[in-house]
Image (cartoon, rainbow, N blue to C red):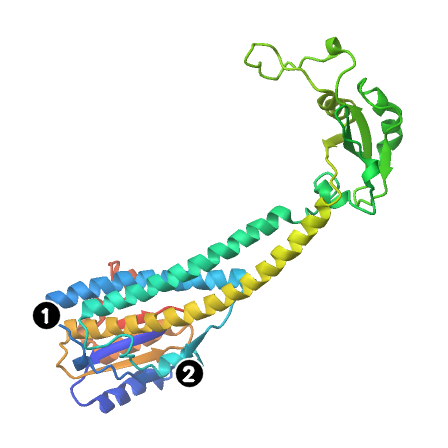
Amino acid sequence: MVYYLIGAPHKSNEQQAWLEMEKHVLTSGISRQAKGRLLQTEIGKFKLGNLDHLMFINDSLLKQDSVVESLLKKIERQYLDVTEKVSYDFVIELKEGPQSIENFLFSFKWNDQTFPRASALSELVKAISSRATHVETDLRQKSTSYQELKNQSQQVARKEGNLLVKDLVDVLKEPIVKPRDFIYSDYLTTLVAIVPKTQVQEWLACYEFLCENVVPQSARQFQIEDKDNLTIWRVVIVKQSFDKDHDLEVVDKEEDDKGKKQKQTSVEEFIQKARDKLRITVKEFEYKSQESKEREKLRLDLKSKSDHMNTTLKQACEKAFSDLYITYIHLKVLRLVVDIAMRFGAAEPNIQCILKPDQGKEKKVQQSLLKLYADPSQVGLYGTKEELEDTEDFFPFVYVPINIP
């Protein structure tokens, strides 16, 4: 949806000029559902200054316009990300109560408390910039806090998938396993093997012979269901070799500082042999009875904090959009005032209004405005920057589009 702020000189009176606008644009058949309203900006209340100053302020406003529009879009993206929605109609929070964007636009009144027209134009631009910066800083802080919580939650989140990708802490927990199922000492350690059901018999026949450090008959299956027909076993390994001269040298390992090749540990040897000979994945795993309980408690705590922060960020986005949109429209109207003063002079009678063309009829409305205000012999000189292949739009009237939402 797009709205137009239009400013143009008139030779009769404002009411007559408005009737002409309605006749040519709002009720011409070009845009039957279009809406329009006169704006009462009272240009004389602004401290406009000379032409050079107006041109400088106009450039500043154009730059600030781009910044504010970008920030509004950023807030909208943040909101949709947090709420997981595709679109949303923001409301504008005013003292009188919430209003839709359209109602706010068509009942707009300049707020002299926030943006006093008696101030220098440069001060008004500074105030607009300051409010935009404040909104961005506040939202960034809340967004950063929310993202940190999300990252923490992801770190302790249960991994979805089969036994090969899941975190074993979430799999090997009571009552499925007991502390006595895992043996850890100076000499013994417990490994966990992920064995396809089709290879269980092969596994039982071969695991004791993969290396000499396997404790005989130490394999034990845990009763865990897996969608990919995988089973999970524990096996006990003697950590130190019985024969130090029997340790295997690993060719692809880097030499240590003394120039000697590093030796494979019994654990590393068993894991490699299981992978190379049986194509079975074996993992080191240290069972801690309280770890899964603590992790679950941490998950619940982070989820609670994340849900609260989600609500906080959602509300912050709504408020930020409302506050910034009010500033945005003041910026647009100030652009209208400055442009009128530059082109036609503040003392000249002029009409200022807001129009809402029918969707898809924006171009026809522009053409209708051209016929109303342009010298017929010069119509071809005017158009949008895309049509003119120029850096800005050029019309015989002041044209300030409102592109958001």
Instruction: Give the quarter of the figure containing the C terminus.
Output: bottom left
Relative height, residue 269 to residue 338 (above, below): above
**Which dot marks residue 225?**
none
Can residue 30 be seen?
no
According to the picture, the residue beneath numbered tag 2 turns out to be 33
**Secondary structure state at the residue bearing disc 1:** loop
Q: Is residue 56 left or right of residue 93?
A: left
Mark 2, other Cα within 10 Å: few <14 / some 14–19 / many ≥20: few
Relative height, residue 21 to residue 211 (above, below): below
Task: List x then y, in percent, for residue 294.
Answer: 69, 49
Instruction: Give the quarter of the figure containing the N terminus.
Output: bottom left
Q: Measure how far apart labels 2 and 1 are at the Cα level.
A: 40 Å
According to the picture, the residue beneath numbered tag 1 turns out to be 50
Quarter where residue 53 is shown: bottom left
The residue that appears at 79% across and 19% down in the rendered structure is 211
Q: Nearer the viewer, residue 36 or 269?
A: 269
Q: Is residue 151 left or right of residue 367?
A: right
Can residue 50 be seen?
yes
**Secondary structure state at the residue bearing disc 2:** loop
Q: Which one is closest to the eye, mark 2 or mark 1? A: 1
Count of marks, rendered view: 2
Task: List x then y, in percent, for residue 225.
Answer: 83, 45
Give the residue type at disc 2.
Answer: Gln
